[in-house]
Amino acid sequence: MNVMEFFQQSAGQWQSQRTTHHLPFRRAELGGSRILVEALSADHEKVIEICKMHEVDPATAVGGAYVQWNGEMAWDKEGEDHKGETVFALVPDADNPQTGNLLRERGYAEIVPVIGRYEMDSENGLVLTTEYETMSSIERFWFPSPDLRMRTSVVKRFGGLSTASFCAESRVETVLEKEKDDAAAREAFAVGSQHSSFGW
């Protein structure tokens, strides 16, 4: 799988359940979000615009994505939210298309244009490394199945404070897809429950 195929598989709506470990305080925080991903072709105007913003030749991009998110965390204060959107372009290295630069309109940890590094590993996982002015982050995304995406991330601040997060993200189906899958699930349950120790 190459990086553009990864984002094409990521296209759609996702429901994310997150656990964030605040390591210095030895406490964990739960949260959730709804995520929308749209894969963008190499000639999409937004991809070209991001390349020009970072002074990168648009012809070197293989595509990109639009990402929108809206979520909440257990420790949120009144008026605090976790929503936003960003666009990014993917520019592979000339000597190895499995690695390259990810040009972002805005970062997740800091709201400024930023260039991160990506790598598709040997297990079809996507690893993103981003250096900000006051922190750095390493994320890994992978698909145990087409409709389930996992994500881990570690954020290190220059003051030494760190967080580690794990997210399980399930694809949100359309009504038609859900009806079709519900019928298949009922049939699978009727067969599978006969081979389960507990019947569920």
Image: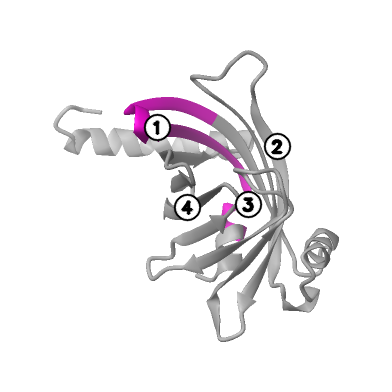
Q: Distance between the residues labelled 1 and 3?
A: 30 Å
Q: Specify few, some or many for label 3: CA neighbours under 10 Å numbering under 14, 14-19, or 20 or more.
A: some
Number of numbered markers: 4
Tell me the magenta residue range: 8-32
Residue for point 35% across, 35% down? 23
Residue at image mark 1: 22
Residue at image mark 2: 84
Q: How far apart are marks 4 and 3 (CA)?
A: 18 Å
Q: How far apart are marks 1 and 2 (CA)?
A: 23 Å
Indicate the secondary structure of the residue bearing disc 4: strand
Residue at image mark 4: 139
Q: Horizontal and vertical percent for residue 89?
A: 70, 63
Q: Nearer the N terminus, badge 4 or badge 2? A: 2
Q: Horizontal and vertical percent for residue 77?
A: 58, 16
Indicate the secondary structure of the residue bearing disc 3: loop
Q: Nearer the N terminus, badge 1 or badge 4? A: 1
Q: Nearer the N terminus, badge 4 or badge 3? A: 3
Indicate the secondary structure of the residue bearing disc 2: strand
Residue for point 52% across, 59% down? 128
Q: Horizontal and vertical percent for residue 125?
A: 44, 61
Instruction: Give the answer, above or below, for where 5 lies relative to 108.
Output: below
Tell me the amino acid under the disc marked 2.
Answer: Gly
Q: Specify few, some or many for label 4: CA neighbours under 10 Å numbering under 14, 14-19, or 20 or more.
A: some
Q: Residue furthest left?
A: 197
Q: Distance between the residues labelled 1 and 4?
A: 16 Å
